Image (tube, rainbow, N blue to C red):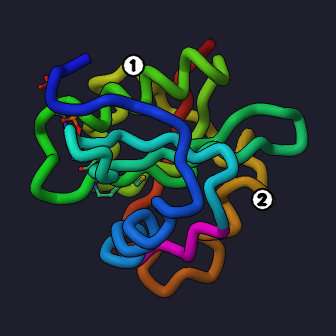
Amino acid sequence: MSDLFTIRDARQDDMGLIDLYALAEGMDHIPGPDRVRVAVNEDDEVIAFCRLQDDMNGIAYVNPIVTYAPWRGYGVGRALIEDAHAIAGELRLIARGTSAGFYRKLGFVDMPWSMTDQAAASEDCDGCPYRAECGPSPMRLLG
Ligand SMILES: CC(C)(COP(=O)(O)OP(=O)(O)OC[C@H]1O[C@@H](n2cnc3c(N)ncnc32)[C@H](O)[C@@H]1OP(=O)(O)O)[C@@H](O)C(=O)NCCC(=O)NCCS
């Protein structure tokens, strides 16, 4: 990992920044620090986060991952996904069209919608007015 940041479990006092980053990306409120890992700078301030949610079969979904915009391109997202993979094994997610290239770089492959779990992730897309422009696609990284 880079000297620029470290990864640790999220705490309640991180939630303000985490929610701000989620909101800025048009994502839902993050309910709490449970199963959220954060990348922090040298001042222990959150610069990115990754939240996991299990589906009904216990498979972990990334929902979501966000790097604070000024920190993008420094390997923070890669480090958080590698951390999540080491913790949870197989990872699944519904990628936004704009981020599918990021996941492909990290070894994710496409997965059919029939393998997704409504409760974990795909319910976010059903009925979403921005679905067409977002171009969501299910992907997975095998354990
Ligand atoms: C997607 C996101 C998390 C990537 O985070 P990041 O910290 O910038 O990612 P990294 O710097 O670790 O990038 C890892 C690699 O992926 C590449 N990459 C990053 N974003 C990419 C993108 N959108 N498309 C294609 N490749 C991308 C990087 O160039 C890098 O490649 P390299 O290892 O060859 O240099 C970040 O852009 C983000 O927060 N986006 C907004 C929220 C979002 O869309 N989240 C995903 C929801 S599905």
Q: CA distance from mark 1 to mark 2?
A: 24 Å
Give coordinates of residue 35: x percent, y percent: 66, 44
Give coordinates of residue 38: x percent, y percent: 43, 43
Q: Residue 128 sits in which quadrant?
A: bottom right
Q: Residue 7 sits in which quadrant?
A: top left
- 29 in the magenta segment: yes
Task: Identify the residue at horizontal 48%, vertical 45% (top origin).
Answer: 50
- The number of numbered discs placed on residues in the rendered structure image is 2
Looking at this view, name the residue that lies furthest to the bottom: 129
Within 10 angstroms of label 2, few (less than 14), some, or many (20 or more) residues?
some
Looking at this view, name the residue that lies furthest to the right: 56
Residue 138 in sight in this render: no
Task: Identify the residue at horizontal 32%, vertical 29% (top origin).
Answer: 6
Within 10 angstroms of label 1, few (less than 14), some, or many (20 or more) residues?
few
Query: In this figure, which residue is indicated by the disc labeled 1?
Result: 107
Q: From the image, which quarter does the C terminus lie in?
A: top right
**Ligand 1 shows up in which quadrant of the image?**
top left
Query: In this figure, which residue is indicated by the disc labeled 2?
Result: 118
Magenta-tinted stretch:
26-31
Q: From the image, which quarter does the N terminus lie in?
A: top left
Give coordinates of residue 61: x percent, y percent: 64, 42
Task: Identify the residue at horizontal 35%, vertical 40% (top origin).
Answer: 39
Check residue 75 in the rendering and tell me which mark sits there, or answer none.
Answer: none
- Vertical order, 45 against 87 (above or below): below
- Helix, strand or loop under label 2: loop
Task: Identify the residue at horizontal 88%, vertical 35% (top origin).
Answer: 57
Give coordinates of residue 101: x percent, y percent: 26, 38
Residue 79 in sight in this render: yes
